[in-house]
Amino acid sequence: MRQFITAYTLIDGFKCMVNGRLLFYQENILTFADFIKALYKQEQVNYPKFYKMDALGKLGFIASELLLRNKDIKSYPPELTGVVLSNSSSSLDTDIAHNETIRNREHYFPSPSVFVYTLPNIVIGEICIRNGIKGENAFLVSESFNSELIAGYVTDLFSRELVKGCLCGWIEVLGNRCEAFLAWVENQADVAETKPGPFNPVPFDAEHLKLLKNQNDR
Amino acid sequence: MPQRILVTGYGIISSIGNTVQECYQSMIAGVPGIGRICNIDTVLRDELIVGEVKRTLPELLDMAGIEPEEGYSRNTVLGIIASSEAFHHARLHENRQLRTGLISATTVGGMDRCELFYNDFLTNETRNAYIDSYDCADSTERIASRLNLTDFITTISTACSSAANAILLGARLIQSGKLDRVLAGGCESLTKFHLNGFNSLKILDQKPCRPFDKNRAGINLGEGSAYLVLESEESQKITGNKPICELKGWGNACEAFHQTASSPDGVGAYLAMKKALELSGLKAADIDYINAHGTGTDNNDISEGKAIETLFGNRIPMVSSTKQFTGHTTSAAGSIEAILSILCLEHQVIWPNLNFSEKIDELNFLPVTRLITGEPVCAVMSNSFGFGGNDTSLIFTKI
Amino acid sequence: MEELIEKLKKEVIEQLNLEDIKPEDINPDSPLFGEGLGLDSIDALELIVLLEKNYGIKIEDPKDGKKIFFSIRSMAEYITANKK
């Protein structure tokens, strides 16, 4: 059975697109914090825990919300739903924040709520908590988006029948530089059953992943 | 029939020894590696005890044959030492036509040096070599380049299950025919960064840790590195390596409960163990020993214990944690404990759960409290659970 | 005491990133944990940091937090009794 990408989110330079449609862009936004909060407000997500997340958590959470809210992912067993993400800076953005709390003996107040986000895979935990996802999850760190690796990893999960639906992509934040690309992947048979939506599913492979992620660059 | 995955080499460095043989000797003698902090200048120096590798960075560099000015972090050097032992054990330098991958796990990356030099990176150029070492992947690439591995290299970072996931991914890549053999494991050095972080979570025990004990009070952090060599059967026929054991099952699940806490019923741990068991084709009763994640925190041990009870019912295998020996080596724990579990198969022993005195009220089973010898050990399970709810279980069997 | 309670409300909101909650939304006698503000174990640890940072009070055993952080009022009472 072949897999298809049936929805995707793309966030780059404070601009947010879902399934190829522009969802959010405001010219006067200068910081990541302002951007992600404005996007959260505009989309009326209403999940107070959002404010407690670090930047990587917020970005991944919002990207997954926008992607999954029109998807009936609950129709898949939670154990057969997976999340495979990647980026290049790991949790560096929050690592710096934690380091600031311990580097000076006079202002030594390590914060537990900052420290818990000094792991890149916590963003996966947040997405799984929100959506009740209990299947395989992995976070891969590479210099740039490795579409071959992600496509290979996720295809293998499908062929081993470890997942029936899988979220995959790239979630990167460092300071005010952010970039997110999330794709929702499911089996062909399942896609056929869903009604045609605003986005025509494309085959899931390294080439299409790359194409969708880089469409802004063209 | 999927490819069998054979373990044909291993290497380890930890607070209980610098080689597999040394670690085995410490385990048999029942000598833990936990003690005062020697290599890190931290405000927590007098408060905490840890499982440190008993070597300074210059000593480690010397062991690995690396020149001091090359910008290697302690973490990377630990990785190089353990991976080299495994590499030479399985003679990976021979039969270069075989596609050989390196999958290395770490979370601290090059933090141990960067946190020392962070404040004057801008003004002191002599330390620039360390800036690039911060990235997690830098340690992997340096290991790959020392060992001349080029076919496939990747870094996994999923908190305390990282190294177990490296092994899991290695097995998959072999089964899917992408690689013939894989060097898989992880490295993690102690840093002020995570000592302070874990301390702020108030889950560090100031005394030797007491996993599965009623009065447990948290973790002793540790450091180290360990790698396995995994081979397909065809590859093993070519290399002629003697298989140490078989990697028979693996499973990963997300708990979806809390960023750092485990659920009271341990559903993530249960799912990971169940998947591994199903893949192995074994029955629950076939598992002789579980090397538990067993961190010694209030939360983990109940959660993991409940999951074990759910999966194994009233036939619970022998269970122990070995973190009383090595400390919790976080991202390296998965591969360090995989090797300690494999040693049980090889030498037909089961490691004692040290520092135990009283059963946890909520659990119905006791951990193994003395070294067991003379009983058949044919299948062992090694658990590694991480923050983010990333839970992994591996099963190794005797050939 | 009432002054301290109002100050504490603001500090708790800031320390725990409760952006959508205003000081007047918090009843000083209602439980902070469980239902209501939706706080968890990490928040409890964060409140320990707050006491140390803003009031110089150190809590060694996190289990003591249960009583101290029952409500904003119990926090205020503890601070008044232990402030150096």
Image (cartoon, coloured by chain):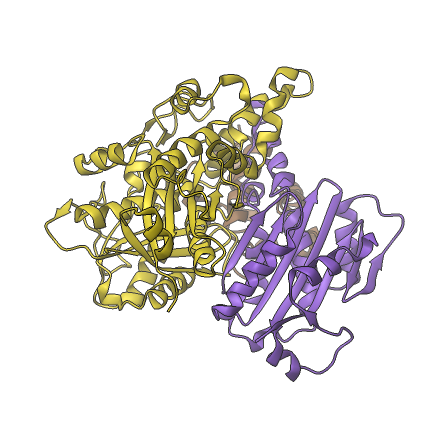
Q: In the picture provided, is A26 more to the left or to the right than A43?
A: right
**Which residue ends up furthest to the left in the rendered image?**
B374
x then y, percent, for residue A85? 60, 55
Quarter-wise, where is residue B355 in the image? top left
- Image quarter where the N terminus of chain B lies is bottom left
Q: In the picture provided, is B121 more to the left or to the right than C84?
A: right
x then y, percent, for residue B273? 36, 62
Q: Which chain is purple?
A: A
Identity of the residue drawn at 40% across and 23% down: B60
Q: Which chain is yellow?
A: B
- With respect to residue A186, does C43 lie above or below? above
Q: Which chain is brown?
A: C
- With respect to residue A49, does B353 lie above or below? above
Identity of the residue drawn at 69% across and 20% down: B122
x then y, percent, for residue A145? 66, 50
Pick the front one: B98 or A109: B98
Quarter-wise, where is residue A124 in the image? bottom right
Pick the front one: B94 or B252: B94
Identity of the residue drawn at 40% across and 65% down: B271
